[in-house]
Image (cartoon, rainbow, N blue to C red):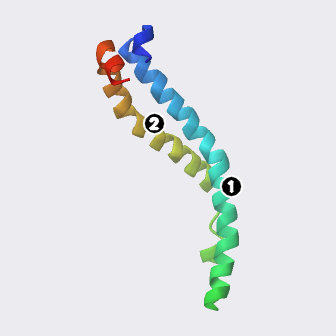
Amino acid sequence: MLKSIGMTPRQVTVMTVTSTAVLGALRPLLGVPLGIAAHRVVLPRMTAGADITLPRYTTDVWHAPLPAVLAFAGVVIAVLGALVPARRAARLTVAEVLHNE
């Protein structure tokens, strides 16, 4: 659709990858805190259910830099995952794009 309104292949690629990068940057804002919360709720219940006690170093795994690294990794994975389909879509002609729609 972007090509049908006059965008160049490069603009289509940049637009698609940028929109994916924005979503990839927003998702960790919700996903990382939810993952940490789930870890803190589920792990104690699992250990209590199995009637075992884990050492603190195996349960206290969330430190300040780790969520930032996970958020950055999410953005990188989103961009890399969008790059190939975006480039392939950018190479299609307008006629092929409209025929597929």
At horizontal 33% and vertical 13% (from top left) the residue drawn is 94
Which mark is on residue 79? 2
At horizontal 68% and vertical 78% (from top left) the residue drawn is 44
Which mark is on residue 33? 1
Residue 33, picture quadrant: bottom right
Percent position of residue 48, x then y:
67, 86
Q: Is residue 73 left or right of residue 87?
A: right
Q: Is residue 64 visible?
A: no
Q: Is residue 70 left or right of residue 95?
A: right
Residue 80, picture quadrant: top left
Residue 11, picture quadrant: top left
Of helix, strand and loop, which one carries label 1? Answer: helix
At horizontal 48% and vertical 22% (from top left) the residue drawn is 15
Distance between the alpha carbons at the discs numbered 2 and 1: 22 Å
At horizontal 58% and vertical 47% (from top left) the residue drawn is 71
Percent position of residue 29, x then y:
66, 46
Q: Is residue 8 left or right of residue 96?
A: right
Q: Quadrant of the N terminus?
A: top left
Of helix, strand and loop, which one carries label 2? Answer: helix
Above or below, 53 relative to 96: below
Above or below, 71 relative to 11: below
Mark before the other along the chain sequence, 2 or 1: 1
In the image, what residue type sits under mark 2?
A: Val
